[in-house]
Image (cartoon, grey):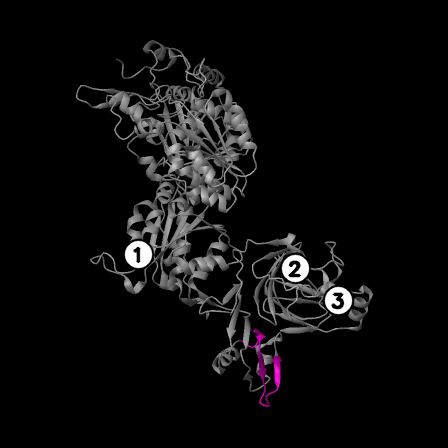
Amino acid sequence: MINRFSLTDRDRQEIEKLRVNPLDIQNDNYDYSKVVVKKPWGYEYLIFANETIAVWILYLKSGAETSMHCHPGKKTSLVVLEGQVNCSTITEQLIRGAGEGLWIDKGAFHQTSAISEAGAFVMEIETPVNKRDLVRLKDKYGREGQGYESEAQHSFDTQNYNYISFQGLEIQHNLKKRYGQCSMTFKKLSDANVLDEILQLNPEDVVCLLKGTLLDTANQSVVAAGDTMTVDALKQMGQLQIGENSEMLTIKKIDRILKISDCVASFLNENGINPVFIVPGEANVHLLDSIGRHEGLSFVCTQNEKSASLAVESFCKLRSGLGALVVSSGAAAANAIPGVANAWADSVPMLVISGQARTDQDTDGRVRQLGNKQLNVVDIVQSMTKYAVKVTDPTMVQYHLEKAIYLATRGRPGPVWIDLPIDVQGMVVDEEELIRFNPAELSLTATASTSEAQRQIAQVFELLRQSSRPVILAGSGIRLAKASKEFLELVDRLGIPVLTSRRGADLMADNHPYFFGRPGTYGQRSANFIIQNCDLLVSIGSRLSIPLIGRDTKAFARAASIIIVDVDPNELKKPTLKPKLPINMDAGSFINGCLATLPESLPSYSSWIDRCWEWRQQFPPDSYTGPSLPPDPRKDNELIYPLSVLRTLSDELAEDDVVIADGGATLIYTLLGFRFKSGQRLISSTGLELPGFALAGAIGACVANDRQQVVCLCEDRGFQISIQDLQTIVDYRLPIKALIFKSKGHSIIRNIQRDYFGGRFVGTDHEIRLGSAPLIEIAKTFGFPTFQASLDKQLQSTIAEWLQIEGPAICEIQVEDDQDKIPRPGFTIRDDQKWIAKPLEDMSPFLERKTLAETMLIKLVHED
């Protein structure tokens, strides 16, 4: 329904009082087609304009309102597209819902306020075109008497706001835009058939003539540009003729016809998956356009698919939620695999949607490739996803999307992949024909029942009563279960020493009274002593990987009864460990169950805690020293060692800061030497330890962190293979601080080659012989502020200055190779050349056997 606000005597009186200067409302012909105008009540942008009419989209926040204003020289129509508004004049009010509108006379004062919870989208049609034709009578934001917003309130970031023009090339597609259940479509009235189609719309749908005229049988104009009415009112005018070059806008009150790519975009928005990471390609253009035109979505476009996949993986890790990546077909899809493989290993929920060749170009496999850039990516990623499917039936798109994210986020999270052919993306379907997914279809492995869970938790407390040296090993499953806060409460109430896995490294601050480090093959020596000497190990949400428990799995926590809590039943059946009490339960459910049934009293473990502190003091985590170990190489040395960098960085960073670490040596140094503060996060590629993860990961983390500063720790080689990501950082002005550990490269591998292969540095001595790329000079070409340090006395001031600068910056630290000095896995090579791994407590550089025996509370293994 279209109502009319007519000009009244009261309107004339009020505008007479204001004594408007005609020059103040004179048209300045400003081009608004590429800006979004920010308003105190929301924003507005121009979606269409010609020489006589302008169509604007207004978004009003819930409870916000425009000024009470009028347009002395132009007539205006308002149509609500989504939500509900209260439209007022000086004397009356009228509530309008989606598909309903107003025709407002020249000079009639009016005001619009959003009364729906999510705000409202309103279309405003004005003729003639003059944005300065504005007189404000009153305004709760203090703009009475002021003209239209100046350029200071203009945003030139117009992604997701599409401006439509009929000028130039004929436009065949995408002249339709949806808001909730409403849709607006721009049409050229090229012949009578187009007008007849419009007249067949629902009588309550709305039309507006944008250009030209409609004539009656007497050749008299009955509809002029800017006239807005319902389809029923248009029909009542009888037989109509189309004037020359006429254009019309139609607004369907309820539009159930969906383009498939629009369906995908709406699905992403409805499930809160925003922003979407994209890389453009020929096979995903429909998806790109739908995402780009959707008001509720934003996007981040990286330089290539590998970077995008790592960025979205990092985004999901920081948010502990679902993210999405949209790529094209062929090599584009293959390039996205590294991030998917990382997400699979690290239990990260992640949705990938790839374009694909047309469905009529499918092959049965005997013809390797028929379609353009065709690649059977679904078969390739089956082994590293929880769900992967190619969708050829448009009515099944919603079903597969819903099933994919259900599986991605249930049980042990992981990536999912939807392959969507280009022709299916462009198809249309009736919304009511879309098939929905019902989780009841799946027969998922059930976790422990309530009674079984209670019984198992009671067993845990009984084992704690019997224990004198218990330890909790905390993994990333705790954060995935969104139980970090509850976990800290449980630790405080139990009073038990806690160690963390590599992905769980940021669960506790280093200064927490019950935190004692991070064990592992490259872990902290003191933490390894603790886990190897405990008599009860409670692992919560950790998959107890080989890098954590060591290659000699039989010697891991060999004096302990082991309890493993894991949501993945397969992790409880691994051949590496035989838990005394396997508990198939979500970490959050286990922690909350423990809190709910916590006994009134438990044994005191004070003597055990004192012993843990002794080990930590004997073998400081960020030090190279300890009993019977060589002296600290940093003594009387002006050079910079990696652990010094991590110690300094720990001191300079604040609570809640986010750190991204490359795989390899950088991750090892970070887990050894960084001292976490409350709320800090570490995002890394722990499962695959991918070199070059950090820069792309920092992009995703920065976006997830609301574009606040993140710190990125890179190996020089990792930085070099990620240089393209610098352009993305520049494009989006992301405040990423990148720190490069400048060394001679391949330090871990060279150490193994030196110790066990006679010093034959095959493939690892390029930087030593030939030098390395001038990374700082490369960074300067992108316009980054750069910092460098090569002496220990420069370290603190350089890092402080680098962190304090506003925006992105790059710091290069020349570090010494210390791989022969940090704790690392130990091996014995037998005469038959078989490598025998030593247990976690027996790390290289090796302690004297007597010292090691005195340090341990249990018997040594692998005695010489």
Mark 2 crowd level (few <14, some 14–19, many ≥20, 10 Å Cα): many
Residue holding disc 2: 115
Q: Position of residue 841 (x, y in %)?
A: 35, 19
Of badges 3 and 2, the one in the foreground is 3
> In the image as oriented, which residue stretches furthest toward the top?
850
Depth order, front residue of 767/455: 767
> In the image as oriented, which residue stretches furthest toward the bottom?
218
> In the image as oriented, which residue stretches furthest toward the left?
832
Q: Is residue 742 magenta?
A: no
Residue holding disc 3: 22
Q: Considering only order in the chain, which callout, 2 or 1, is on the residue closer to the N terminus?
A: 2
Magenta residues, start to end: 202-223
Mark 3 crowd level (few <14, some 14–19, many ≥20, 10 Å Cα): few
Q: Position of residue 472 (x, y in %)?
A: 44, 27
Q: Position of residue 443 (x, y in %)?
A: 35, 50
* Residue in view at x 36 percent, y 42 percent: 344
What element does badge 1 sit on?
loop
Amino acid bearing label 1: Lys
Amino acid bearing label 2: Ile
Spatial separation of the CA atoms under disc 1 and disc 2: 49 Å
